[in-house]
Structure formats: structure tokens, C-alpha cells
Amino acid sequence: MVDLKTQYEFIKDEVDSSVLDIFKNGTFINGPSVKKFQSDLENYLNVKHVIPCANGTDALQIALMSLDLQPGDEIITSDFTFAATVEVIALLRLKPVLVDIEEETFNINCDEIQKAITPKTKAIIPVHLFGQVANMDRVMDIAKTNNLFVIEDNAQGIGSTYFSSNNTKHKSGTIGDLGTTSFFPSKNLGCYGDGGAIFTNNDDLAHTIRGIVNHGMYVRYHHDVVGVNSRLDSVQAAILSVKLPLLDFYNERRKEASLLYSNELNQNKNLLTPIVKNDCQSHVFHQYTLRVLSGNRDQLSKFLNDNNIPHGIYYPIPLHKQKAYTDINYNEENFKISNMMSEQVISLPMHSELDNDQIKFICNKVKEFFKAQEN
Ligand SMILES: *Cc1c(COP(=O)(O)O)cnc(C)c1O
């Protein structure tokens, strides 16, 4: 699905020397490279505060911890996302309220957010799934009207630009009160291990979070709040500072790959290629996800397996059906789209090193499968 080896070959010299510097200096934790990456990312995102942490799941958990919520407070999020988003809500004894998605974008459906709001609702977590920004104008509007916090789960969307209806533009993850991301190796901006970060323009939240990530300490050995230990290590930060200047180039390459895929596949009546809303800038194609309309997604998956073509099914089971997150009050009628998507979606290899021949080869195999089905 990704080709991190080829990507490394292109940046090897810079990565190697920046990592060796840290080995020589012995500044493995909280070294100067962490401060540097933090400020590099603040500049890139045009956001006041970036707080690095250990991974994208921690970033979500810490974001929620900073909001002074009470057990049982309700957090609305998408039924169709990676489990981390809902896991941290449940872990903090908050109540996840899962809602259905939009058919076109796989992102949270704002009409459903509206319906799910109760007096106990405290926050909304939109997820910029597969790299396309959720409808943030609507999300922010609903949040403002109902006095709710917004945490953007930007693990899949880093680098995308959201164009608001009022003609302003912002990097994804910097629109809500808080944004989070993951630097897992296969994400659009990946390190060589685990990493994550929280973004905010709110000085108070930034201060609170800087304490939470460091055992709740604001003054050394004074633990004012219950915190965690969640750090981005110096080696990962140094690698990320090498890769950050290439993020726009990497995302551009992903977009080009997506156009080529869609050009090859959008005439196939069995398939629906991804729909890019508004400006193409709002989609950074963390995944290239097709919908199989002919009911044989699993056979296609098997065929691709037999032909050694990597692919993924994100996500095969919507969260409301997962044993850990199901709730007797959920009604299947309310999850029509996420249920349908879990049966239709299939993601093809997507990364910045894909070349045209590889894409054509993959598409020809996909076409071959549907041809054989017709005969
Ligand atoms: C990857 C991912 C996460 C978690 O990131 P980790 O760094 O693996 O903890 C959270 N949310 C979404 C949508 C993701 O894709």
C-alpha cells in the first residue's frame, strides 16, 4: 500500500545525518530537534501552538483531557473511522455518540450531528477521512450554536487546505478548537516509528496540554492535574523536519496518482471513483478508496490477493457494530450509509512514489476482474 523504502532512498543523506547528529549529541528526549520541528510545523500550518506527543491516539486522548469534561458527557463522532477516535472517548469514561456519514465523502453527516445533540453533548470530533476535509463550515456552525468544542482528527488529512464559504482558507486541523494528527509511518507525513501532535490557536488550551503531556506538571515535580507521559522523541522529530518541506510535494504526487486511477476506472459501471468536493486542495488522498457497486467487493479483494496487488478495506465493520462500542440504543436504520460503505469500499495502493506504469497495471487487473465476471 505504501513504499517507504523508495521514499527513504530520495532523502537518505539528509535523514541519516540528522539522526546521526542526535546519536552523537545524546539528546534523545526533548532535544533541540523537537523544538525545531514544533516550530516548523507551526509555521507550515499557520497555527499558534503545536504540541508534539507520542502518537495520534494519544493526541486525541490528550485533546479530550484538556477540555475539563465530566464522566458521561457526550462526544459526537463518525461511525466510519479508525477505532482510535472512539476508543479514547470510551477510555476517558465519556460517552461516544456515533453518527452516520455522507455518501459522497465518507465524512460525518452534519444533519446527523444536529439530531444527535442533547444537553449532555460537549464536543464533536470530525475525522478528515481518507484525506478529505469534513464539512467544517457546518461543523463549526453547529458547534457555535450549541456551545460545543470541536476536535479535528486530522490523522489522515495533514497538509490539506480547507476553503470556507466566507473565502478564507485554513490548513485542516487548525479550524476547530483543537486538531490532532499522527506521524505513523504510512500517514501522509510519517516518521520512522510512532509520533503525533496536537494543534491549537487557543493559548489556554495549549498551556493545559503542555502540562498534560508531561505528567500534569507545570512546575517541576508539582503535579496539578492528572497527566500522561507522551513525547515525540528527538530522532522522530529530526526525521519529520526533513520530511515536512516535502509534504506538499508528496500530497501533490498522491493527487496526481488519484487522477490517473480515476481516469482509468471511472468508466467502469461497477465502480464509483472518489468524489472530490469543492477544490481539489481539500483532499490529500491518504487513501484512494473505490466503491464497488456490483456487490462483489470481497471477490475483487480475493482476486487482487491472488494477483499480489496490495489493497485495504477501510473499514470492514462500522464502529457501532464493534463489540467494544455497540450500544443497545443504536438503531441500524440510523447507520444506513456506514453499513453500506463497509460492504462497498476497497482502497488501492496510494503513496507519493507510485508511478504511472504501476497504476495502469493495478487498474488493468481491476478491469480484468470485472470483465471475467461479465463472461
Ligand atoms: C492513524 C489514525 C489514528 C491513530 O494514530 P496512531 O498514531 O496510530 O495512534 C487516529 N485516527 C485516525 C483517523 C487515524 O487514521
Image (tube, rainbow, N blue to C red):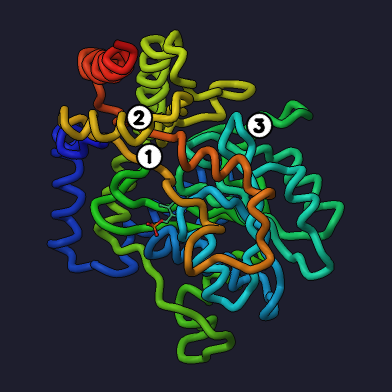
Under mark 2, the amino acid is: Tyr
Provide the residue designation for mark 3: 169
The correct choice, above or below, for 285 with respect to 146 in the image is: above
Can residue 44 be seen in the rendering of this structure? no
Q: Secondary structure at mark 3?
A: strand
Q: Which quadrant does ligand 1 occupy?
A: bottom left
Q: Quadrant of the N terminus?
A: top left
**Along the viewing direction, whichever of 155 and 95 lies nearer the viewer:** 95
Q: Label 3 crowding class (10 Å Cα cut-off): few <14, some 14-19, many 20+? A: few
Under mark 1, the amino acid is: Asn
The correct choice, above or below, for 256 with respect to 121 in the image is: above
Which residue is farthest front?
375
**On the image, which quarter does residue 206 sit in?**
bottom right
Provide the residue designation for mark 1: 188
Provide the residue designation for mark 2: 250
Q: Earlier in the sequence, mark 2 or mark 1?
A: 1
Q: Position of residue 7 (x, y in %)?
A: 21, 34
